[in-house]
Each structure stands twice: as structure tokens, then as C-alpha cells.
Amino acid sequence: MSLRKLRLAPLLGVLAVALVPLAVRALLPGSEKYYLHLAVQILLWSFIYTAWSLMGRFGLTSLGHGAFTGIGAYTTVLLWNLLGLTPWLGIPLGVALATLVGLLVGYPCFRLRIAGHYFALLTLALTEFVRLCIVGLRDYTGGSLGTQPARYGSGISLYAVQFEPDRVLAYYIAFALWLVGLYVWLRVDRSMDRYALDAASQDEDAAASVGIDVTREKLKITALSAGMSALGGGMFVQYQMYIGPDTIAGLGLSLNIVFAAIAGGIGVLLGPTVGAVFTQALAEGLRVVIQGSETLKGLLGSSALSLDQLIYGLLLILFIIYMPKGILGSLLAWWQRRVR
Amino acid sequence: MDCQLDIFFLEAILNGVLLAGLLALLALGLNLIFGVIDVVWICYAELVMVGMYGINHAYKAGAPFLLAALIGIALVALAGAVLHLLVISPVLDTPPINQLLVTGGVLFFLQAAATMVFGIDFRNIGIRLGSVGLLDMSFATARIVTFVVALAAMLALWLFLRRTYLGTAIRAIAQDRQIMPLMGVDSRRLYLVTSAIGGALAGLAAALMVLQYDIYPQIGLQFGPLIFMICVLGGLGNMIGGFIAAFIISQFIAVGSSCFHTEWGYAVAFLFFMLAIFIRPQGLLGGKG
């Protein structure tokens, strides 16, 4: 491959993703809505997974991102439903709140050098705390049943940031968000902070001794990652038009975020996106296969719904044991070996 | 819902103490495994769930409860050993966080498997032990039994670790992982035994929990985070610290739940936990980091 072709590749890739709605319309005219829904889900989750991988790749394995997405989503919805505040303000407020929470938890963690298991379990406690607060404030949040943003007019509105009925519009909004996520990832990847964090993740004392303010660097990436996750949560609820404490907050979601990112590959730009495609394709693919086959349907009955989770869990175990670099990371490593 | 210093408040506190016994038992297994193998089984509560289903089925199939409980304990002990062999040992030399995450995969797997096999409905083993009255207070007998058995099990484990050859070997390997193999100890066998003991403790907890709680596939999510919190608060791997932490956390839950909604008891406990760790990051009793 020549250098020229390599430079063109990203542009062509972005163009290809931009043309997905047209391709869907041409190839799958009957079920356009369904496939676009899948595509929107993949892009929105890719954004959240990318946000997690910003800090996850530096050994900051947070199980607290369910808290950040939950804060972003619930702040947006509650301000809209209770005070009539437009999500144009609600989402930034949610992002600010999540960033603040990230800093409040991050600062003592990094100062006290809480890392590894302790960091994972502490952030897990944060997730549970936020989920319990959401359930506990059931008079406002609907508790475990969840809530939905009040529909504004026809359901498509710039003021209310509602766009769910128009799937093509939703796709391009999610697409733009996804590009923003990739751009942030690249900016971080090419910054000095990245080298500082790489150094700190390998040996904190050594990094500090060459003048890196480790706490500050970790706080910066945590604030960025938490804020982006909240933005993702806020946009997710504007599209989904429903949230429950288990769909957008909680331990299950936190683990899902971590796993999808790892399955795709956390050291590479498109790893989290590949993870999102993979998890969605797995769930939907199994559903289609089971629905399509009478024998499987009869054999599994209603338990078929859990089959994707079962296989998902199994694959995660296999991935972490045999492919810790994830799908894309392993593919790239294999490709590089081949080229050499 | 107001909070008064009356007899019901005392009842809440005592119920908290009873709950602490169970939580301490749950934390003990996880602490044992962490202390010896340096691995966090994030699916620990899911193993308990498997045990609960096993005991429920054995009992419904006609086995007397004690036999059913023994079957459950053996089942989860086996599950612990299998978990170690198939899932943990391949990643033992990789970054520690991988070991935590790989058991997260097991968590999803076990939850989904339970949902597929047993469905999502709540099941109850249907044993009623009644309650014991004291002054104006009443306590479920099942809770008292749980407390006593949990304490006895902890004592038994302590004696095992102190007084037997195998127990001594386990304590030794917990102190120095590198040197023991040089002394001619087969560390892999010790890890396997420890995993089985950790599983057996989860099975025992399951046997006690079926008397008090309904069984459903997601029950692990209700207890799992609590157990981790107790272990970290006590100092991961520190069994006595975990024991004390169980009593602190359960008081937050019991008193908080009696004064407010249940969730607020838990929420305050998690908040307290985070603040406590920021003050004492190594946990209440130091412990090995």
C-alpha cells in the first residue's frame, strides 16, 4: 500500500459511513427503519465506548461510567420534564454535573494512588450510588420503571432536541456525535498528555520523577471521559425517548461499556466502534436466527432472549484470555506482522 | 417516615447485626480468594445464585433440606474449582484487571444461563421457620439461624487456617507467592483448593439465603456490589477487616432502611464507603494492597 492510498483511506471510510442511509434505502427498502435504528444505536454506543476507552487505555479501568451516562441522561430528562428547560441547556448541565462527579471521585483516588482492583471497585460503588439515587428519587425519576421525556409537538423539534421519528435525521446526528468522539480520541492520542499518561500507567513514580503531574493528567482524562459519557447518555435518551435505571445506569451497563470496548480493542481508534458493531450484531443476529428457525424457537422458547447474553459472556471470557487486544487490535497486529 | 429512638429502632439495629453475619460470610469467601490468589471474583454473588437454585431444586426433588444444602455447597465448591481451572488460571500472569474482567464475563454467562434454564420469575423454597419474639420486637428465625451458622463457619475456617497443615500452607502462600513454589509447594494445587473452599463458602451462604430470600437470576446484582464494598472497606484480603466492615455496612442499610426507603439505606452505605476509602485507602485494617 502506498502512502497516498493510506491517507485517503480514512476519508473514504467516513464517506462510506455517511452513505449508510442511502445504501440501506437502496438495498433494504422494506425494513429501512429497523436497520437505521440499529445503525443509530451502534453509533451512539460507539461514542460512549470511545469515551470510556479514553481513560481505559491508560489502565484506569473505571466501572463508574454507568454513573456518568446515567447522570447525563437523567439530568437532561428531569430538567426538561419538570422545569421545561430545553436539552440545549439540560445536556450541558448534565455533562457539567458528570464531569464534577468524575473530578470529585477522581481527585482523592489519584492523590491516594487508588488503582487496579481498588479503583475498579470504588468506581463500581459510584455506579451503584447513582443508580440507587435514581431509584430512590422515584417521585421524579419514575424509579425502577424509568421515565420518558415529554414529547414536544410532532416529536421532531430543534428546541426540544427530539428527532426520533425521522430515522435519517437521527442517523446523521448520531454520525456527527460519533465523528466528534473519534476526533477527541485522535486529539488525545496526538497530545503530550497521552505520553504522560502512558508513562504514568507503566510506572507512576518514574513518571512523577521526570516532572509529570500524574494526578493532574489523570484528572484531565477522567473529566473528559466522564463528560463525554454524560453527553452520550443525554443524546441516547433524546433518541430512545425512554430511560430506566438499568438501561442507562447501573453495574450491568458499566460492565457492558468496559466489555464492548475491550472486545473491539482499546488501544486503537476504531476499537470501541468495532466493539459496538460486534455486540449489536451478535444480539440482533442471534435474534434473527432464532426467530427464523422454528426448531430453535420451539427448543428455546422465551429463554432465547438470554441466549445472546450467554454467548456474549462466553465470548468475553475467551476474548480476555486469548485476544486481550480485542478484535481490531488483534487484526491490526496480525496485519503489521504480515506487511513486515 | 420518621426516625424515633424507640423499640423499633432497636429492632432495626439488631436486624442489622443479624444481616451482618450473612454479609461477613459472603465477604469471607471473596477475601480468602483475594488474599491467596490475588484475584477478585466479580461473579462471586452469581455463584451464590447458582447454589440457591441448586438447593431449591434438590429440596423440591425430595431431598431433606440439610442434604439439599450439602449438595448445593458441593456444587458451588465444584463451580469454584472449575472457574479457577478454566477461567482464572489462563490469565493469572496477565494484568490484574484482566482477572477481574474475565470473571465479569462469567457473571453475564451465569446470569443468562440461569434466566434460560429457570426463567425470570421469583422462586421461593417454601420453608417457613417463623419468628422469635423479644419484648415488642420480632426476629425471623431464619435470620438468627443464618447469623449463628455464619459465625460458626467463620470460626471453622479460622481454625482450619490456623490448625491444619493445608491451612498453614494456604496462609503461607498468601504471604509470599514467589517463595512457596521454591519450597517445593505445588501452588497450583493450593489455588485450586482455595477456590473450592471459596466456592463452598458461597454455597453455604446460598443455603442460608434460600431461607430468607426469593431466588431470581439477578439476585447477584443485589448482593454483589455490597460484598465488594465490604471487602474493600475491610482491606481486600483482610478477613478480620471484612468481618468488621460487614457490621458497619449492615447498620447503614438496616437503620437507613427503617428510617427512609430501602434504597436510601444502601445509597448512604455506598457514599460512606467512598468517603471512608478516601480517608483510609488501605481499608479499615490496613491489609496488603
Image (cartoon, rainbow, N blue to C red):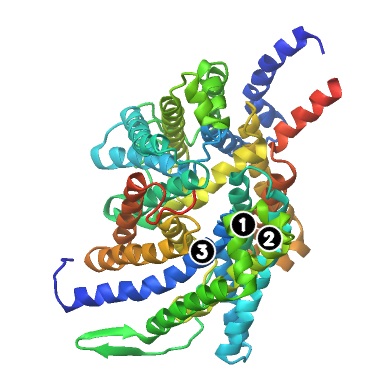
Q: Position of residue A248 (x, y in %)?
A: 45, 46
Which of the labelled discs sits on residue B220, or is there none? 3
Residue type at mark 3 is: Gly
The residue located at (55%, 63%) in the rendering is: B32
Q: Give the answer, above or below, for where B153 lies relative to A148.
A: below
Residue type at mark 2 is: His
The residue singled out by tag 1 in the image is B37
Asked if residue A54 lies left or right of residue A152, the reply is right
Task: Measure the C-alpha gap from mark 1 to mark 3.
Answer: 22 Å
Task: Measure the C-alpha gap from mark 3 to mark 2.
Answer: 19 Å
The residue located at (47%, 36%) in the rendering is: A164
Q: Residues within 10 Å of mark 1 (few under 14, many from 20)?
A: many
Which SS class for mark 2?
A: helix
Mark 3 vs 2: CB contact within 8 A: no
Q: If you read the primary sequence from the N terminus, does the residue marked by circle 1 or circle 3 appear first?
A: 1
The residue singled out by tag 2 in the image is B84
Q: Give the answer, above or below, for where B152 lies relative to A106.
A: below
Q: Give the answer, above or below, for where A259 lies relative to A314.
A: above
Closer to us: A122 or B222: A122
